[in-house]
Amino acid sequence: MLMFPAFDGCQDTPVEILHVFLLGTVKYLVRDFMKKIKGSQIEDLKAYWTSFNTDSLNMPSHKPSYMVDHYQSFIGKDFKKVLQAAPFVYFPFMNSTQRALWSSMCVLGSYIFQTRIENLENYIRELQ
């Protein structure tokens, strides 16, 4: 690769949220979680999706059966829904270690998807 003194590939290339976060980390954790859901837990999970109210969230409505039965076919917007709903829908089926991992991921997601930053210094400090 050519060496340009004004260009640093790591610092000057923006991270693409869709491919790095949603179709990376979130996708693999969703698939890992869903593979462990068996038997009556499937119906329980559908019930949690049914009771999840999206009125105050900036997301379209969802179909509970689709969110459980077709997780292998999710696209970016589906993974974003899961990220927003996980504390209410997935957490009852998780152990404490899984909850800690998913909690961190959900908090990180809330920072990643912010469209406007009021106080950049506080944002960076909280992000670290």
Image (spheres, helix red, strand yellow):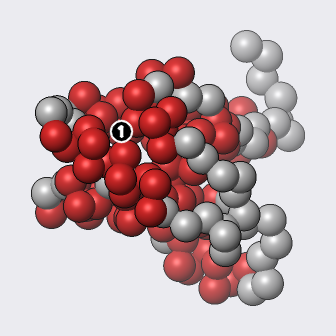
Evaluate whether residue 21 shows in this view: no
Q: Who's the residue at 73% across and 13% down the image?
A: 1
Q: Is residue 23 depicted above or below 111 in this figure? A: above
For residue 34, side relative to residue 69 (left or right): left
The residue positioned farthest toward the top in the image shown: 1
Amino acid type at circle 1 is Leu
The residue carrying pointer 1 sits among few (fewer than 14), some (14 to 19) or many (20 or more) residues within 10 Å by Cα, namely: some
Evaluate whether residue 42 shows in this view: yes
**Residue 114 occupies quadrant:** bottom right
Which residue occupies the foreground of this view, 20 or 66? 66
Q: Is residue 41 depicted above or below 9 in this figure? A: below
Q: Who's the residue at 72% across and 63% down the image?
A: 58
Place of residue 110 in the rendered image (x, y in percent of width and height, measured from the top left): 59, 65
Q: Is residue 89 depicted above or below 77 in this figure? A: below
Which residue occupies the foreground of this view, 40 or 33? 40
For residue 35, side relative to residue 46 (left or right): left
For residue 119, side relative to residue 78 (left or right): right
Which residue occupies the foreground of this view, 75 or 113? 75
For residue 4, side relative to residue 18 (left or right): right
Which residue occupies the foreground of this view, 56 or 113? 56
Place of residue 50 in the rendered image (x, y in percent of width and height, measured from the top left): 46, 54
Place of residue 55 in the rendered image (x, y in percent of width and height, measured from the top left): 67, 70
Q: Who's the residue at 75% across and 86% down the image?
A: 119
Q: Who's the residue at 85% across and 40% down the image?
A: 6
Place of residue 47 in the rendered image (x, y in percent of width and height, measured from the top left): 35, 53
The residue that mark 1 highlights is 29
